[in-house]
Every structure is written in structure tokens, then in C-alpha cells.
Amino acid sequence: MKNENLLLANHELDCFVYSASHDLRSPITSLKGLIKVTQLEDNMSQIKEYLHLMEQSLAKQDQFISDIIDYSKNKRAQIVMEPVSLKELFEEAISQLMHIENADRIIFTKELLVDQIHSDSLRLKIIISNLLSNAIKYADASKQEMFISIKTSLTDGFNKIEVTDNGIGIKEEFKANIFEMYFGTNKNKGSGLGLYIVKEAVENIKGNISVCSETTIGSKFIVTIPNHYAI
């Protein structure tokens, strides 16, 4: 069993290093090319367009580095059970994600039937931030009203966190693979690490995650974690 776990860990590490090196270099290569063509351009509107593309490349790399940090923390940090406010974690995550395109157009609603729980704050922060980030990135800008609904509850001894959106949804053929390392339905939107990290973080605190989604209608991610009480 130990050998199997070691082989799996080595395979994951190989995949991670290969893909990480490519994804870290890709935005740099893009930036180099854009800088060269900008230096030769006199048209101000075209220069502004190139600058916008540079900004997108940097944002992509920044997000990827953030995902790598989350991945590393989730793998290495010890699990610490302590009182955590879900309300505070949601508010902090939303305020930090407002820079994402269309975030200011999205209506956030909260129904927090559970706030204070006893769990690992680092993993919960990773879970909540990534689920909200995805919901914002994959919002459907063609809809007149975009929303993200957040709900927490206590059901059958488990704390439940639900993040629902009316975004573009997930195609049926992708649903079975969305929690795999480096699987991304649109690499321009993210690194392909986000949901893999979320699943790992959920499993580290003995919970589980599921998704219901329909193309053009939206998605709902449901996280259930044990209801640990402070001793």
C-alpha cells in the first residue's frame, strides 16, 4: 500500500512539475512578444490594447502562482482544528476577488444558517476562495442579472456549504474530470489547479464535495464537512 501511495505521489509530482514549468513560462513568453510589438507601434489605441493583453498575461501568472502556494500549503501545513467564522471567510474572499472581470456586476446573496464552526481555517479559506473565484470567472456576462448565492447549513451532523451561480455551467462530458489535476475547461480562465486543490482540501478535513451543473443555466458546488465541536 505504501509503494502504491508513493508511486501515486511521484506521478502527481511529475505532472505538477511538467505542467507548472510550462504554465509559468507561457505568460512570460507572451509578455516578451507583446513588449516587442508595442515598442514598434505608434498608434495609441493599439498600444492600449497591447497593454491590456499584458495585464491579462500577468493576472494569469499571478493566479497560477497563488494556486501553487495554495497547493503547497494544503500539502504541507498541519491540520489545526479551531473556531472559524464562515461569514468572515466569505466576506474576506469576496473583497479579495472583486478585481476579477465582471465581479462588480454580480449580485452576491448569503443565507448563513451556520457561521461559527470548529474546523481548519486554512483549508476552509482555500475551499471558499477557489469556489467563489470559479463562480466569478465563469459567470455568464450575456445575462442581464448575474448572481452567486452562498448558503451554509447543518444537515445530519454535517456542516454544508453551497455556492450556486447562474454562470455558463459545465458541459456534461467535463463533469467527471473537473476535480483532476490540471483539468481545465478553459485554460484562459484558470490554471486547472483550483478544483483539484479544493477537493484535496475538502478531503483533508474529512469532507466531500459534489457538483450539479447545466450548460447555460449555472452550477452548484456542495461541500459537506464533519461538524466538529470544540472540546
Image (cartoon, rainbow, N blue to C red):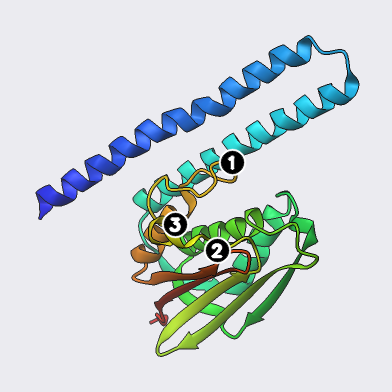
What distance separates the C-alpha of mark 3 from that of mark 2?
Answer: 22 Å
Total count of labels: 3
The answer to whether 216 is drawn above or below residue 161 in the figure is above
Image point 41% across, 54% down: which residue? 196
Asked if residue 206 lies left or right of residue 195, the reply is left
Give the residue number, with chain letter if any, for mark 3.
174
Amino acid under label 3? Phe
Camera-nearest residue between 149 and 71: 149
Along the viewing direction, whichever of 39 and 204 lies nearer the viewer: 39
Q: SS for tag 2?
A: helix
Q: Residue at x 40, y 60 (%)?
A: 199
- What amino acid type should be assigned to the residue bearing mark 1? Asn
Q: Residue furthest bottom?
A: 156
Left or right of residue 204, residue 213 in this image: right
Q: Is 71 situated left or right of 60 in this image?
A: left
Please identify the quadrant where the N terminus is shown. bottom left
Residue at image mark 1: 188
Q: Identify the mark nearer the N-term, 2 or 1.
A: 2
Residue 208, located in which quarter of the rendered image? bottom left
At 58% from the left edge and 71% from the top edge, which residue is drawn?
163
Pointer 2 and pointer 1: residues touching (CB < 8 Å)?
no
Q: Earlier in the sequence, mark 3 or mark 1?
A: 3
Q: Which mark is residue 128?
A: 2
Q: Are marks 3 and 2 in contact (CB under 8 Å)?
A: no
